[in-house]
Amino acid sequence: MKGIRKYASLFVTTLALVGLTFLAVPKAAAQQDGPPGGGDADDTFNPPPCDYNNQFYADNGIDVTQLVGRFGDNNGTTRLTGPPATGNQHNYVADSTCSVNDPNRRNFRILATTGGNSDDNNSPFTCASGNGGPNCVNQSFLEPETFEFISILAFVDNQNAFSSAYLRNVGLINGGLEGVQQNPGTGISIGQTSLGETPAQTLRGFAMQDIVSNFEAYAALKQTTPQGFALNPCSLAMIKQLQNPNATSVPMPCFPVNDTVVNGQPLSDVATPNLRQDWRFATNRNAMDGSDNNNPAAATVVNAPFGYFCDDLLGMWIITYFWVTAPPNDPHCGPIYQSIGAKNGFNTDGTPIVLTAFELNTELEAQGCGAEAKEDPMGSDGGAVWLICPGIPDPRAGGIAPDAFLDQVRNSNGIPQNLITTINFLSLQIFGVFPNELTQGQMKKVMQAANGS
Amino acid sequence: MPGPKKKRFSRRNFIKLAAGAAAVGPFFVFRPNAFASEMTLKVAKWAHFLPEFDDWFINVMAAEWGRQNKTKVTVDVIPVEEIHKRAFTEVTAGKGHDIFIFPWPPAEYHQHVIDHVGIYQTVAAKYGAIQQIAHRSTFNPNNKKYFAFADFWVPSPLHFFQDNWAQVGMPLGPVHYGGLLSGGTRLRDKLGIPCGLAFSPTLEGNVTLHSILYSHRALIFDSRGNLVFNKDVFAAKAVGYIQALCQDTGTPEQLTWGSGGSVGAMLGHKSSAAINAISLLRTAEKQNQDLARKLWIQPPLLGSSGMGVTALPHVTNCSVVWNFAQNQDGARQFLADLIDTSRTGYEKSLGVNFPIYPKTVPNLIVRLSQDPQANPPSKYTALKDALHWTPNLGVPGYATPEYMEIFNTFVVPKMVARAVKGESAEDAATAGAAEMQRIVDKWKQAS
């Protein structure tokens, strides 16, 4: 996703240079400040994230009545407070500009901005591979290729949320042009067998559920429980997927994978207080930036059939839960944990922070030191199977609003586990740019703000 | 490349020759059968799942080609389960058919076939480059030769009875392998209907099991061709998963079904899901429309450990010209000309055969979305991205002789049978790995 930011930057800059004399594009105006951006009103042309409206959910094959913990539901009370917000903080705010900026949105602007990592530097424009290029100039260590900012709008706990049939007429004109214009319109339809459609398939001929299967978000739940360090989830079906296919019971202690209710509010099993590390997003099987590099005839096939921003319009992910299967001091797995932790850092329970697919699949799972599973699509595990959590396409220039807050995993002392995410968030929020565009003075302000986080 | 077409003797040439002969006088001896003699081309092919395709192939396509090329074409149709044995017999004897058509990459016969690169080059001029699945299925990276020529492939989507799965809370199907196990368990407990994937030593069992292994990161070879099976925990875990799938959701017959066993069970509505070619759904459409309506297809199940959504091809149609073939030129020409008929072949196979050369069926996506037999007509759009989720046999490497011998000697179904019959998954995986190693060593010695 970072790559598109860079391309967007290049595009806007080029556009500004080419069309400066006759195009009054926002960035052109911003150029008057001179780089770096100054955080003025004219530097904020990206709208911050808002929830989608019901119609947009429905048009994309989602039954909103089946969503769990959707921001703004129940007259703006559902999950207004509580995790990820703390104290009196609010997760969202009513904002009438949402639907003005984007008619597919409803007027709840999301303040809770969740940080995560996209694995494996799979952006085609990555600098981490050492390919270099103009996009990598001035990149600092503060700007790794891997972070993402998402808005967790709602959870999907079972398959019933995917509509099998839907029909909406658009474009109907009855009596325009002084009563003489007529147009029957056309239908946005899903699974209309009378129209020859397959149940559950959207207009584009894909079932939403199948599209989402190409976008995996990895959740690491805390494994410390009151009964001790748990080596498996409290779900036999999940244990049987990879950890122990022949298991007949759930070994204890186990870590819960079901939603709970706290203070009358639903608390998802993947709410931030339940996580031991920030989210990971798989980018090795899809095109996060919308550039489908797929060329089946090429020597190297990039198996990227779907683009995140162009196919997965709701920003949905299927959740893959992963965990370690041995305690941190295990003689076989302990050294592996130490090796990964030495690179990435450690969670408060002593397990290593896992950032890449290689670390999870090859270093942990292949050695019998880690496992993963997905929850039952029918919802019998009681937790989230899917997430509606769109990534923010361009978090610069207003994409992170002044009243937004960063939702990230913290250590037991309250300090954010990943300070790079923190600094990037604050840089974007205060100045609308990534840290490599800050002046020394601006960077100082960001660091001061980070110290207060 | 000279082909039978160059041997054509036109009416105009005949008149010229006759006039010349008349000028030479009565001493010219005209051999009455000289121009009537026909070349022959002997073809052996696997029996397609839909007989109407073979009818067309034999009686229309091959017959017409024979007429146009003054060649007597004979086509022997061989049941899939006998293909391997018949090919081996021909190679051992050093005689048999000119063209032998396999439903998989016959890599183990690479020393007994011509280099097919010329056929690919001939076709490329008209239809462009081949797809990756064809290249990796027919190219030998060691000797840099194409040991076969691929013209179509058959995807392996998940088939499931929507009415059954809806009753256990999954109206849109099981989505991932975890869902297949948990939902399949509930389904058998509640309705008494087993899941019904094929685990037997058949083509469908092989494709199903190899797909499950791959989807669980239990690789047999790595991308460089090194045997890696059971070198980490994934192999035993995957075998354990299949063991659990069979025990919790299955039926004992899954291990012993003959060719088409899972199809029969599905058509009898006696199992709830199968990984198969869409010939299964096509047959249902012909036999029982109500059953076909309940039978849905979806892309493959989402795997674990970063493997994404994949399923191996049910068929990779690979033709070889033996190096002992009597009519090699005719065989080359026949295979090159075959591509001209890909579109008709797609239609005669009722959409089962996906073209290796996309240009031959340029409106494939439209056809999938407006299928006249399907109910609803867009049912097959689930396949429109099939090329993206179908790697070649042998993935992440090529279809090597070692891999294909493992495939054709059913090492994986036999390994799974051991596990299901009581051996631990670890022991079964160890035994399977040992057999694979034996095959690898054998090929190493032979090279």
Image: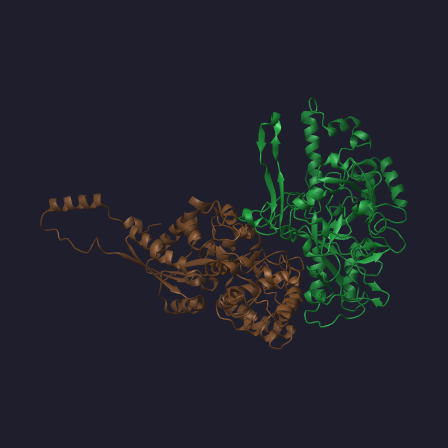
Which shade is chain A?
green
Q: Which image quadrant for residue B92? A: bottom left
How far from the left and from the top, in percent, is residue A242?
69, 65
- Above or below, B374 against B240 in this view is above
Q: Residue furthest bottom?
A: B422
How far from the left and from the top, in percent, is residue A4?
69, 40
Q: What residue sits 49% from the left and 58% below the top?
A: B289
Can residue B189 be seen in the rendering of this structure? yes
Query: Viewer-proximal residue, B118 or A252?
Result: A252
Q: Which chain is brown?
A: B
Can residue B144 be seen in the rendering of this structure? no
Q: What residue sits 46% from the left and 47% below the top?
A: B361
Image quarter hosting the N terminus of chain A: top right
Q: Is residue B435 left or right of residue B88?
A: right
Query: Viewer-proximal residue, B254 or A166?
Result: A166
Q: How many marks?
A: 0
How far from the left and from the top, in percent, is residue A335?
78, 64
Q: Which image quadrant for residue B438? A: bottom right
Q: Residue furthest top?
A: A21
Query: Viewer-proximal residue, A202 or A374?
Result: A202
Query: Viewer-proximal residue, B72 or B366?
Result: B366
